[in-house]
Image (cartoon, helix red, strand yellow):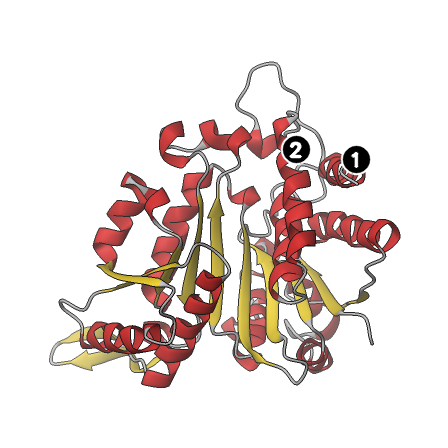
């Protein structure tokens, strides 16, 4: 049986730095746990443009289609701001999502107890928070036609079309219910069925899919109320299912409950491959942070947690994902802080590399 395969795309800015720390963790799993991965590496974003003149080479795209999981660091930076839109670094990321048909974007919002005071909300509201937002990623208002800026009478009008097919809603909903079956068996579907026909269809299809999962408690909520509830009582949720536009907004809202973007991973999943594993790409939520690139200030935890998501959702290694998440929780509880997590007087930040080493040491201590 072949080893699980991973394509690492470090990207730009702090991407290579945080991905170096993920490689340390992958190496530890091989040496200490006997879990071997076939790891390859390539270029994406500005780094790919510098070498190939495009943000994602065709050969790299082909590799991404063949492996079990892609780990991506971050793309973009001011050096590429004046490039034509078609070759901007972000186009490489969008091409990966589109051609791999990664329609289910998983954005966890988990608040480690040691960081509960970093949230803008009160500790008792966020301590112990562990929710998952599933955002449909490949349709909706960002892709619907017609779209554009047109002349209408004596003025211009901007048009974007919210469009969903039943099948697009169904596959996202089914992913949410499958996810809930592995968690606390609750799905809250958020849309605007009170004012949008696409919301009515979304609610109808989600309700129908829910009948196939009688163990899962399904509820519906208007997305605006959902945003309010996320900052009022976020722990009422388990899995939140929503469309592309509302998911974009709600997931960023939930992100701030945890205290730092440097702590947040994500996964984008597609249809199962021949081996039964979903096509998948994992990446931290944070950007390339070019202002601190190369300075050893970046927090690698979001990227390491992205690998933990790969263990859980691509490789069916939930126990190993728990092991890695537990090691991170211990490191934070012991007081290790990168610069983005400083909030206590007299605490000196540790470097990107030192945080990665601390996570590996905690893994080793946990054996």
Q: Examine the image and state in which quarter residue 137 appears.
A: bottom left
| Residue denoted by label 1 | 365
Please give the label number shown on residue 111.
none
Please give the label number shown on residue 330.
2
Camera-nearest residue between 155 and 68 = 68
Vertical relation: 326 (above or below) 12: above
Name of the residue lying farthest toward the front: 215
Camera-nearest residue between 335 and 36 = 36
> What is the quadrant of the N terminus in the image?
bottom right
Spot occupied by residue 36 in the image (x, y as percentages of width and height): 83, 62
Spot occupied by residue 62 in the image (x, y as percentages of width and height): 70, 82
Do tag 1 and tag 2 residues touch (Cβ < 8 Å)? Answer: yes
Residue in the image at 28% along x and 50% along y: 227
Query: In screen coordinates, is 90 left or right of 42?
Result: left
Vertical relation: 222 (above or below) 136: above
Observer able to see residue 75:
no
Query: In screen coordinates, is 20 left or right of 167?
Result: right
Q: How many marks?
A: 2
Tag 1's secondary structure? Answer: helix
Distance between the Cα atoms at labels 1 and 2? 10 Å
Observer able to see residue 221:
yes
Tag 2's secondary structure? Answer: helix
Spot occupied by residue 275 in the image (x, y as percentages of width and height): 68, 81
Spot occupied by residue 254 in the image (x, y as percentages of width and height): 39, 47
Crowd band around label 1 with a 10 angstrom C-alpha radius: few (<14), some (14–19), many (20+) = few
Q: Earlier in the sequence, mark 1 or mark 2?
A: 2
Residue in the image at 61% along x and 28% along y: 333
Residue in the image at 63% along x and 82% along y: 273
């Amino acid at each position: 049986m072949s080893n699980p395969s991973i394509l690492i795309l470090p990207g730009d800015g702090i991407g290579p730095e945080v991905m170096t720390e993920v490689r340390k963790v992958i190496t530890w799993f091989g040496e200490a746990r006997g879990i071997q991965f076939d790891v390859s590496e390539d270029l994406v974003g500005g780094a790919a443009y510098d070498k190939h003149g495009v943000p994602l080479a065709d050969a790299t795209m082909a590799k991404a289609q063949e492996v079990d999981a892609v780990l991506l660091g971050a793309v973009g930076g001011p050096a590429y701001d004046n490039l034509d839109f078609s070759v901007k670094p972000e186009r490489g990321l969008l091409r990966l999502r589109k051609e791999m048909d990664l329609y289910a974007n998983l954005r966890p919002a988990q608040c480690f107890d040691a960081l509960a005071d970093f949230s803008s909300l009160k500790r008792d509201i966020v301590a112990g928070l562990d929710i998952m937002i599933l955002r449909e990623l490949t349709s909706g208002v960002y892709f619907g036609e017609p779209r554009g800026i047109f002349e209408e009478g004596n003025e211009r009008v901007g048009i974007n079309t919210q469009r969903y097919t039943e099948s697009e809603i169904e596959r996202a909903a089914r992913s949410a219910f499958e996810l809930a079956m592995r968690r606390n068996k609750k799905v809250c579907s958020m849309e605007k069925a009170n004012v949008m026909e696409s919301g009515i269809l979304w609610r109808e299809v989600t309700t129908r899919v829910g009948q196939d999962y009688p163990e899962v408690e399904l509820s519906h909520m208007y997305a605006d109320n959902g945003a309010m509830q996320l900052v009022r009582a976020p722990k009422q949720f388990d899995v939140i299912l929503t469309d592309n536009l509302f998911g974009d907004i709600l997931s960023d809202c939930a992100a701030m409950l945890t205290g730092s973007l440097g702590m947040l991973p994500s996964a984008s999943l597609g249809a199962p491959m021949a081996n039964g594993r979903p096509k998948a790409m994992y990446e931290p939520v944070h950007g390339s942070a070019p202002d601190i690139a190369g300075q050893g200030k970046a927090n690698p935890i979001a990227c390491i947690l992205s690998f933990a998501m790969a263990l859980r959702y691509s490789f069916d290694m939930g126990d190993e994902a728990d092991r890695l998440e537990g090691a991170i929780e211990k490191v934070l509880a012991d007081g290790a802080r990168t610069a983005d997590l400083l909030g206590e007087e007299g605490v000196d930040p540790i470097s990107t590399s030192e945080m990665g080493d601390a996570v590996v040491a905690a893994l080793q201590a946990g054996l």
